[in-house]
Image (tube, helix red, strand yellow):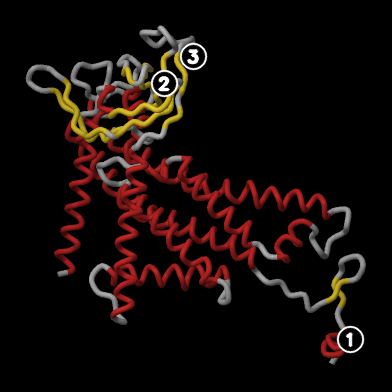
Amino acid sequence: MKEVSRSVGTLLLLFALCFSLQGFASSESDDKADGAVSTKEEVEAYIQHHIKDSHDFHLFSYTNGAGERKHVGFPLPVIVWSSNGLASFMSSAFHHDDSGEVIVEKNGSRFVKLHSKIYELDGGANEVKFDEAHHPTNAHKVLDFSMTKSVVGILLVGLLMLWGFSSLAKQYKTKKVPTGFGRVLEPLVIYVRDEIAKPNIGEKKYRKFTGYLLTVFFFIWILNLLGLTPLGFNVTGQLAVTAALAIFTLIIYTVSGNKDYWMHMLWMPGVPVLIRPVLAIIELAGAFLIKPFSLLVRLFANISAGHIVVMSLIAIMFTLKNSLGVAGATGLSLVLSFFITLIEVLVAFLQAYIFTMLSALFIGMAVAEHDHEHEHDAHGHEVADAEDVRENFI
């Protein structure tokens, strides 16, 4: 049974990889009639487009017998606030155009899509004009509340987590040992509780923050795994998402910080008085800038880099086909991409673990109870009482 399960898992992984290869090979390009990506510049442009958020799901493209370019995917609702108020329409109205050529008229405004961003044309403009840096001069950005690919991924993962953990909670009420998918979740929940929450926060206060740590761990992990599927999710590779998660951790350890935490941050005991203001500035910068910045950048950079590496290896079959041959370039690309994808499965778990571990560590530092049994003199130096001196002497 285990062998069968492993075989099925391997086949699914190979299918996902081949699906990704197909989507890469048939991606759209404005420079060629068939839309194939083959040159180094086209590959780099496609990779940069892939890791960005999108207003629709684009699975792959192909050219039919009549020479028409067809796109396979499905649109998402576009919701923007323009100069004339709220406007909504489906992203299919842009016809997969990302160069600003297609104009959508809605609610008295004209909208164009340029580099995955939606702009509103100025009054009377019938086309987008650019400056020397290729920035639009007669269009401005709008407030975008659209249901993008990342939003769909967040909602999907949220529903999956709500269903999975609700089912696990119900099983705990009726029976002692979970069954079904609950048996998969239980060891992971116990792992986060016993290996992350307890050691870093402490036996007395870990329960208060375990719910948040479990949510963050599974949220990041499942989203990272979805990013390896042909659907093209790259939610944790978006700075806005990782920044939001880091801000949640910042708010929690800032609000939960006890008296000792703030005392050691603002007026560090045990050091000369003149140095304390300098240390206070450093500690405040670490708490409000360095810690959240390290959380958001580490997750964003690692996930984005993983996507870029995988797609760069897939591109070997196109960029090196002339020197290695079609069979050689394809074989090399397939083998390297397969092993890097396996590593990415590990990285998906590792990044969720690191973010959760650091969040628990920062929270633990904020709620830790310091030992104040020893008195301090006027200069902040520790003074041992007479009993301690006698015991050490004996």
1 or 3: tag closer to the N-terminus: 3
Write down the quadrant of residue 55 in the picture. top left
Where does residue 343 sit, x and y in percent of width and height? Answer: 34, 52
Kindly identify the amino acid type of the residue bearing the numbered disc 1.
Ala
SS label for mark 1:
helix
Q: In this figure, which residue is indicated by the disc labeled 2?
A: 119
Query: Does any portion of residue 329 appear in the rendered image?
Result: no
Q: Is residue 210 above or below residue 122?
A: below
- For the N terminus, the image quarter is bottom left
Query: Does any portion of residue 348 appear in the rendered image?
Result: yes
Question: Which one is closest to the eye, mark 2 or mark 3?
Answer: 2
SS label for mark 2:
strand
2 or 1: tag closer to the N-terminus: 2
Write down the quadrant of residue 70 in the picture. top left
Kindly identify the amino acid type of the residue bearing the numbered disc 2.
Tyr
Q: In this figure, which residue is indicated by the disc labeled 3?
A: 133
Residue found 22% across the figure and 51% down from its top: 13
Horizontal side of residue 254 vs 216, given as left or right: right
Task: Using the image as rendered, state which of residue 142 and residue 304 is in the foreground.
Answer: 142
Task: Using the image as rendered, state which of residue 200 and residue 340 is in the foreground.
Answer: 200
From this viewpoint, which residue is outermost toward the right?
Answer: 378
Cα separation between marks 2 and 1 = 75 Å
Q: Are marks 2 and 1 in contact (CB under 8 Å)?
A: no
Q: Is residue 291 above or below residue 47?
A: below
Q: In this figure, which residue is indicated by the disc labeled 1?
A: 386
Horizontal side of residue 286 vs 90, given as left or right: right
Q: Are marks 1 and 3 in contact (CB under 8 Å)?
A: no
Residue found 20% across the figure and 16% down from its top: 33
Kindly identify the amino acid type of the residue bearing the numbered disc 3.
Ala
2 or 3: tag closer to the N-terminus: 2
